[in-house]
Image (cartoon, rainbow, N blue to C red):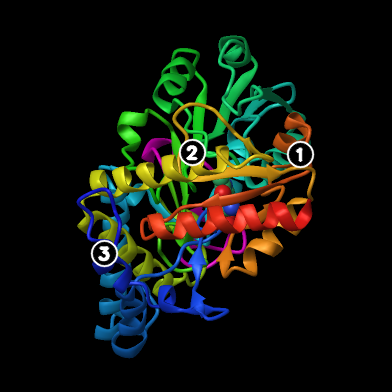
Amino acid sequence: MTTGTDLDLTALRAHFPLLSREQGGRPLVYLDNAATSQKPDVVLEAMNRFYETSCANVHRGVHALSRAATEAYEGARRTMARFVGATDPREIVFTRGATEALNIVAASFSAAHLRPGDRVILSGLEHHSDIVPWQMACDARGASLGVLPVNAEGALDLAPLDALLAPPTKILCLVHVSNALGTLNPIETICARARAAGVRVLVDGAQAAPHLPIDVGALGCDFYTLSGHKMYGPTGTGVLWGRGDLLNALPPFLGGGDMIKSVTFEHTEYAEIPARFEAGTPNIAGAIGLGAAAEFLMSHDRAAVLEHECALYAHMVAGLQAISGVRLVGTAPGRLASQSFLVGDAPAHDVATLIDQHGIAVRSGHHCTQPLMQRLGISGTVRASLGMYNTTEEIDRLLAAVVDARDMLA
Ligand code: PMP
């Protein structure tokens, strides 16, 4: 199998049962990894093993089975701490996805720190999950939103950054990697400038975690969120990492079991992190599956995986560029994993439907980034997004399907 790198793609793909699925008599080509990724056998096995051998509720039980479940769940937390470079596993909060993680920060940070007249800055590349919660928070607190602009290529324009970080700004929220355009943002630089201005930074790492080794300390951010199901973990999983002192100073997001020290009808004392933000029975099997996904990723040479993905991406971009009538949307330097494009004046959904007829899954639409689409003057795009298991042959099938779609729609 063509790799162009040292990665053994045949062995890697054998871990993913779904990749052997056929569509229309040909192997399915899955290029919708930015929406969700496929799951390796080790993730499925870890979840099954939990249900078959140690299913019990965590934390509350003294019995052996509950202790086993708790150990597996807390083991997954330690794994996720290692995965993001956190020194303290208590800084890892399990959530049901990036959306919930972003909502926790928006609701709890705004309750503690946003006053009328304060400002929140979002980048122009944000997913709706990092826009709507902040609009809700700003509405509730009498604060306002500012936007760090995007240029026509899809890169952030940092010229107004320092002005936007000036008072009354309290927090800056931005994606690490754009789900719509693949733009990789200079997080370290931005965090350093925010820190100098006394502004907190929330990084939405949903599209970075599957591809880049993450080190929250080196990035210099205050909060980092990721989506488990995009990094080969189960659906309904995600992580919020935050600096311990900051998280412990925020009010809880949800109230209920497990997030308390003591309750009377008059008053509740909240638990410290991570329980503070994990009310109720968590997605225990999901967290264990996510831990297995992170172990799976870390068991590979991540530099080799990234090299493979970058080589494949370059091949895909060059191939799309060479097709007359195709326009790339998102041309910022140093992009990663996702490439958006349009074919002539054809509606993106029509193109994606024709590509699907070739047994190739790509996404079309606004990708939950309507403000970004408005900035670019379009209503949506076709997006092909890579996972670690994709191959050169699959990209070649995509390129042929795009040519066919173009000719059909001409
Ligand atoms: N942020 C980004 C950049 C995303 O791509 C997505 C998922 N498309 C989300 C947030 C939301 O993630 P989840 O579906 O896990 O809540």
Kind of residue at badge 3: Gly
Q: In the orientation shown, which residue stands out farthest toward the bottom?
A: 52
Q: Position of residue 407 (x, y in %)?
A: 71, 54
Q: Secondary structure at mark 2?
A: helix
Question: Is 249 inside the magenta-drawn segment?
Answer: yes
Whether residue 100 is visible here, answered yes or no, is no
User: Is there a contact, CB below 8 Å, between mark 3 and mark 2?
Assistant: no
Please give left or right for residue 297 compared with residue 120 in the image: left
Label 2 CB less than 8 angstroms from ligand 1 = no
Q: Residues within 10 Å of mark 3 (few under 14, many from 20)?
A: some
Observer-side mark, 2 or 1, equals: 2
* Mark nearer the N terminus (3 vs 2): 3
Kind of residue at badge 1: Ala
**The quarter of the displayed image where residue 168 is located:** top right
Task: Give the residue pinned by disc 3.
Answer: 75
Q: Quadrant of the N terminus?
A: bottom left
Label 3 CB less than 8 angstroms from ligand 1 = no
Q: Residues within 10 Å of mark 1 (few under 14, many from 20)?
A: some
Q: Secondary structure at mark 1?
A: helix
Task: Give the residue pinned by disc 1.
Answer: 140
* Mark nearer the N terminus (1 vs 3): 3
Q: What are the residue bounds of the magenta stretch? A: 242-270
State the residue at coordinates (73%, 28%).
143
Q: Position of residue 121 (x, y in %)?
A: 63, 26
- 205 or 232, nearer to the observer: 232
Observer-side mark, 1 or 3, equals: 3
Task: Give the residue pinned by disc 2.
Answer: 318
Please give left or right for residue 130 compared with residue 311 in the image: right
State the residue at coordinates (62%, 34%).
125
Q: Position of residue 147 (x, y in %)?
A: 68, 24
* Mark nearer the N terminus (2 vs 1): 1
**Up/down of 187 relative to 293, above or below:** above
